């Protein structure tokens, strides 16, 4: 049985990112694996022994509630320390970082990602795509990544976090204003998402795993303890058509990049 933890869907479920858990369950079942989703709501303990965890996006107040709960509970941190795969989207990325800005103040994050999030000058909204870096647990990713970004947070990665992808379209983690004074600012502006330990984080909505089946299968493989190459391929033409449509729809990079 594959046990999928859907973390705080009641506060971090604004943008349809709950769909990532559904994709994982369906792709597992299509391969003959039993799989179930376990919603973990605000105030409930996070079991540390599930096979995989997904966490989605939300607004400022929701982020603060999520961070406070996850820090106090500690279950997700223990799961990460045990190497259990975690997928974090948008606000989930920010909450799992060292700190983020919400409701006009700096909030402590869970600390699973060496990243800090401040504010951007303009909201990043639109199609985003990147080339996977192959960092850490994503070493086997080869297919381009695609999603829809909608955020005002500028996330700067520290030395122990690596980007999930190198931008080819869209804004990504941070804008020029947020990185102007950084020695590696021009490099930070090419980053999308983050990888650290067993955590994979991204600003891609879509849901991300519906638009990136190889990433979904990579997470599944890690959850069941096999290599990506060991999973039987799934032939789903509709997904291929979706990816083609979305890559063709993506806007060129902003001029300030």
Image (spheres, rainbow, N blue to C red):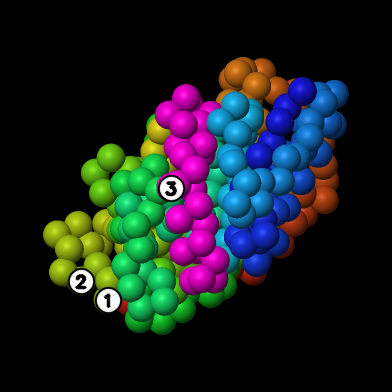
Q: Is residue 53 above or below residue 184?
A: above
- The answer to whether the residue labelled 1 contacts the one labelled 2, judged by CB atoms less than 8 Å apart, is yes
Please tell me the numbered disc located at residue 177: 1
Eye-nearest disc, 2 or 3? 3
Q: Residue 222: x, y in percent?
A: 58, 26
The quadrant of the picture occupied by the N terminus is top right
Left/right of residue 148 with respect to residue 61 in the rendered view: right
Badge 2 local density, few (<14 within 10 Å), some, or many (20+)?
A: few
In the rendered structure, does residue 82 fall within the stretch colored magenta? yes
Dot 3 or dot 1: first in sequence order is 3
The residue at 44%/74% (across/down) is 152
The residue closer to the viewer here, 86 or 245, is: 86
- The answer to whether the residue labelled 3 contacts the one labelled 1, judged by CB atoms less than 8 Å apart, is no
| Secondary structure beneath label 2 | loop
Q: Which residue is mark 2?
A: 180
Q: Quadrant of residue 9?
A: bottom right
In the rendered structure, does residue 201 fall within the stretch colored magenta? no
The residue at 36%/69% (across/down) is 101
| Secondary structure beneath label 3 | helix
Judge whether residue 129 can be spotted in this image. Answer: no
Q: CA distance from mark 1 to mark 2?
A: 5 Å
Q: Which residue is mark 3?
A: 71
Please report the bounds of the magenta region as a residue range.
59-84
């Amino acid at each position: 049985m594959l046990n999928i933890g859907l973390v705080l869907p009641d506060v971090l479920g604004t943008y349809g990112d709950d769909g990532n858990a559904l994709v994982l369950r369906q792709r597992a079942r299509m391969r003959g694996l039993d799989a179930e989703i376990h919603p973990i709501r605000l105030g409930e303990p996070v079991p540390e022994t599930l096979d995989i965890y997904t966490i989605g996006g939300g607004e400022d107040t929701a982020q603060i509630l999520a961070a406070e709960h996850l820090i106090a509970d500690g279950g997700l941190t223990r799961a990460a320390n045990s190497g259990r795969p975690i997928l974090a989207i948008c606000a989930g990325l920010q909450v799992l970082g060292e700190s983020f800005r919400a409701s006009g103040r700096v909030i402590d994050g869970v600390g699973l990602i060496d990243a800090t999030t401040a504010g951007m000058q303009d909201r990043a909204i639109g199609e985003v795509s990147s080339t996977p870096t192959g960092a850490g647990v994503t070493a086997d990713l080869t297919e381009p990544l695609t999603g829809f970004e909608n955020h005002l947070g500028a996330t700067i990665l520290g030395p122990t976090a690596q980007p999930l992808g190198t931008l080819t379209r869209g804004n990504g983690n941070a804008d020029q204003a947020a990185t102007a004074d950084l020695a590696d600012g021009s490099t930070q502006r090419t980053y999308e998402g983050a990888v650290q330990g067993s955590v994979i984080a991204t600003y891609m909505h879509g849901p991300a795993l519906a638009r990136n089946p190889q990433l979904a299968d990579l997470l599944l493989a890690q959850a069941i303890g096999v290599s990506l190459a060991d999973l039987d391929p799934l032939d789903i033409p509709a997904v291929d058509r979706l990816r083609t449509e979305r890559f063709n729809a993506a806007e060129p990079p902003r001029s300030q990049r």
